[in-house]
Image (cartoon, grey):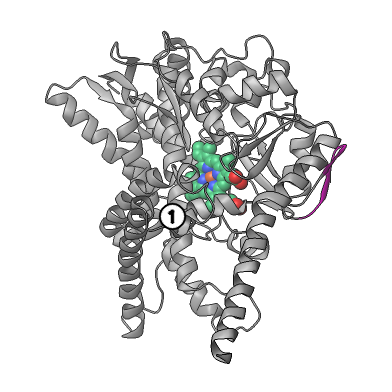
Amino acid sequence: MMVLLAILVVFLFFFVRVAYETVTCYWVIPRRIRRIMEKQGVCGPKPRFLTGNILDMASLVSKSTSKDMDSIHHDIVGRLLPHFLVWSKLYGKRFIYWNGIEPRMCITETELIKELLSRYSTKAGKSWLQQQGSKHFIGRGLLMANGDDWHHQRHISYAGYMVDCTEGMLRSLKSAMESGQTEFEIGEHMSRLTADIISKTEFDCSYEKGKQIFHLLTVLQNRCAQASRHLCLPGSRFFPSKYNREIKSLKTEVERLLLEIIQSRKDCVEVGRSNSFGNDLLGMLLNEMRDKRGISGGFSLNQQLIMDEIKTFFFAGHDTTALLLTWTVMLLASNPTWQDKVRAEVREVCGSNRGAPSVDQLPKLTLLNMVINESLRLYPPASVLPRMAFEDIKLGDLHIPKGLSIWIPVLAIHHSEELWGKDVNEFNPERFSSKSFAPGRFIPFAAGPRNCVGQGFAIMEAKIILAMLISRFSFVISENYRHAPVVVLTIKPKYGVQIRLTPLSY
Ligand code: HEM
């Protein structure tokens, strides 16, 4: 009897505790945050029970993207962020909306953005919901890590194999043309190329297995893009739903393959065939793990963290760069004057290498740099930047309570007439000819201490690939191209970018 009573008390205690925590997390804290912000004049659309404004957003986006655009123009904010347009008109430059139970404040004032990204880089980071959404995908690698872990990991560097991989892609385009093909979906080629480059950078000699892993990661990435739809209900991450099962099995397979590579490197070192784990990113991480082992209290890289890091670099460095390249090719293919100008510059600067720039020549490609910037402005692969306040902070005139998510709509800022002038939706690389422009309005790589670690790598990669492509081929947009940008984590062309290529003689 006593035992039964004790079990009942324990059970009741747990039940009350779980109920209390659920109500606090799902009801009390979000309402408190809402009241604090409303008192400061920051309002927004009324949230629905549990789903917040997710359904409103989904319905606005599905309506705005239901048709393709009727011509190639770049006025895309209303298409990709229709909820932003509607709510900023109704509630002003700062407003709050609800992603399920998570309140999110949208800010567009460049001063506030600068302050948030620079001053509060350690006090505002990735929210719990975002971490849950990507947990099975990139875990706690650099992108998702917060605080000290992040600071340490950031200092790990990487190397590149860009020219070789690009030569390979250009050869395959050329041979396809020799067998009669003239039209190419360039997005596919860019995606394969950047995956090749990042795969070599991370795995070097284990490259073939790396490619297999990256294929699985791409599938996983697409599934994780739907996380907020599947994980918004309380406890939904614990349900054995089809979504959760699929994510788990993909994650297990990716990690099994990664562990196989890690083990084979360790075996080589243990049997004395090598005293280093290699010079690629994986090798560097493993060397670091060995060197740090035994240092108590300090940061140490464990195997799980290494796997997360590898996945993070792939996720952060592959899709984004491929999209930058794809959109830039689309813009150059539909702007022959700029294509000619860039080609002339590439020939002048690196004509002797058949358009393959050396590291010293890269800074001299200034027109190409302007075109890349304009492409990142019009089609920033990361269309929003999220941050969550981990403690109460003061942002400009606002008091931000702990737990409030802040969303920076990069795409809307890059397309703001107030910040860029009347020709904001035109392709005009000339606007980047002067080096100085107000900070906070051009943020494709975020800003401040926690900006993109791969920015230098990505720009170098984009310059090398575009310089080589433009000096070997001229290209025009195909009549089959349908302009239909969509957001699936990043801004993508819905049907790819079809171009027609003509080989150029050297
Ligand atoms: C055009 C290409 C790229 C774009 C537009 C881009 C954009 C961004 C942005 C906006 C962030 C900040 C995300 C946030 O804090 O919410 C970021 C972070 C990051 N990026 Fe990139 N990225 C690009 C290429 C790359 C490449 C090539 C790599 C690696 C080789 C890379 C690695 C990372 C990593 C590791 C982070 C996390 C940094 C941190 O939290 O300290 N990125 N990137």
- Most extreme residue toward the left, as rendered? 179
Q: In this view, does 354 lie above or below 447?
A: above
Question: Which x, y percent locates residue 47?
Answer: 64, 35
Give coordinates of residue 432: x percent, y percent: 63, 22
Which three-letter amino acid code belongs to the residue tagged 1? Phe
Q: Nearer the viewer, residue 63 or 107?
A: 63
- The part of the image, by quadrant, that contains residue 100 is top right
Of residue 344 and residue 440, the one placed in the foreground of this image is 440
Q: Mark 1 points at which residue?
A: 137
- Helix, strand, or loop for circle 1? helix
- Residue 280's place in the image compared with 471, above or below, is below
Asked whether the viewer can see residue 455, the reply is no
Q: Position of residue 267 (x, y in %)?
A: 32, 80
Depicted 284 relative to depicted 167: above or below: below
Residue at 67% over, 42% down: 103
Highlighted magenta segment, given as a residue range: 391-399
